[in-house]
Amino acid sequence: MKRSFALAFVAAPALILSAQEKPSPVGYSDTPVIPGTKWKVHDIDRPRPEAVAPGAKLGDAPADAIILFDGKSTDAFFAKKKDDPKPQPCPWKIENGELLVSGGDCWTKQEFASCQFHIEWKSEPHTKGNSQKKGNGGVFFMDRFESQMLDCHNNPTYADGMTGAIYGQTPPLVNAVRPAGEWQAYDIMFTAPKLKDGKVVEPARITTLVNGVCVQNGTVIMGPTKHKDVTNYEGTFPAKAPIRLQDHKNEPPVRLRNIWIRPLP
């Protein structure tokens, strides 16, 4: 028994060496085709995704992101007046690298459809009001589908108006906000509605993380956001549109930082 054990022990390194000498295949050409595609399983000829360097730390923009706000400039945004369709400069002030949301809603100059979106915000502990009048803001994808931002820490309000809600439609799975005065982070994957001749044939969807916690998981958006009313996809829709950031007239104003976006196919 002792002799057999010794032989096995000696042979083991040789087996490992043999395995290392034979490289693993980088793909195959003799496997079946994946249904609905032109590619075989593990296809050696299938194009590999490009490498993208992630941010240095969690929440930082990856190398291929479009930076909307980095603490230095509001050039990515514009404002507009009800009686003047001409774009106006963004009126929001920058203080200590943070954007103060005060002066009306603002829109991105670029238009987007499906995307990955990151934004961080903070409301002050002594913000006036309660419910929807306390630390309120929002991200409107394609200028019409709102992901709600609100101080929901010890601040009761209706479920479909809480942070992470598709406003007026679907509440978040959980309330994942931190106390007022601390920074909150949104990471959102928005899938634009599929159109045919301007009409919606597949609704928009959204996956939302609040402070790293999933609160929407591929949730269907029922239509453009409305207040105190139901919605639908009647009418025509654009293929792309600006993202709107909401000013809900908080006092003191909500603060924003580290805003970036990655267009998705």
Image (spheres, rainbow, N blue to C red):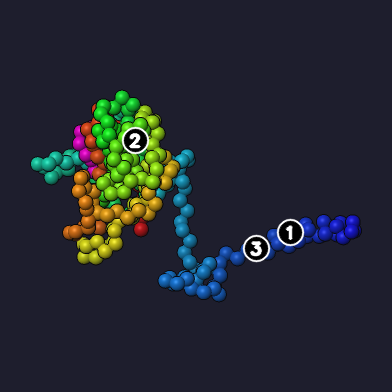
The answer to whether residue 97 of the structure is visible from this angle is no
Which residue corresponds to the image point at 46% horizontal and 41% vertical from the top-left? 58
Please tell me whether residue 105 belongs to the stretch shown in magenta. Answer: yes
- In the picture, measured across the screen, residue 120 lies left or right of residue 47, that is left
From the image, tell me which residue sits under label 1: 16
Disc 1 marks which amino acid?
A: Ile
In this rendered view, identify the residue nearer to me: 252 or 72.
252
Which residue corresponds to the image point at 29% horizontal and 33% vertical from the top-left? 135
Query: What is the distance, in whole Å, between disc 1 and disc 3 at their CAs?
Result: 12 Å
Tag of residue 152 = 2
Q: Are marks 1 and 3 in contact (CB under 8 Å)?
A: no
Residue 176 position by quadrant: top left
Disc 3 marks which amino acid?
A: Pro
Residue 9 position by quadrant: bottom right
Residue 82 picture location, percent across and down: 12, 41
Which residue corresponds to the image point at 73% horizontal and 59% vertical from the top-left? 16
In this rendered view, identify the residue nearer to me: 39 or 140.
140
From the image, tell me which residue sits under label 3: 23
Which range is magenta? 101-108
Residue 25 position by quadrant: bottom right
Disc 2 marks which amino acid?
A: Cys
Residue 37 picture location, percent across and down: 43, 70
Q: Are marks 2 and 3 in contact (CB under 8 Å)?
A: no
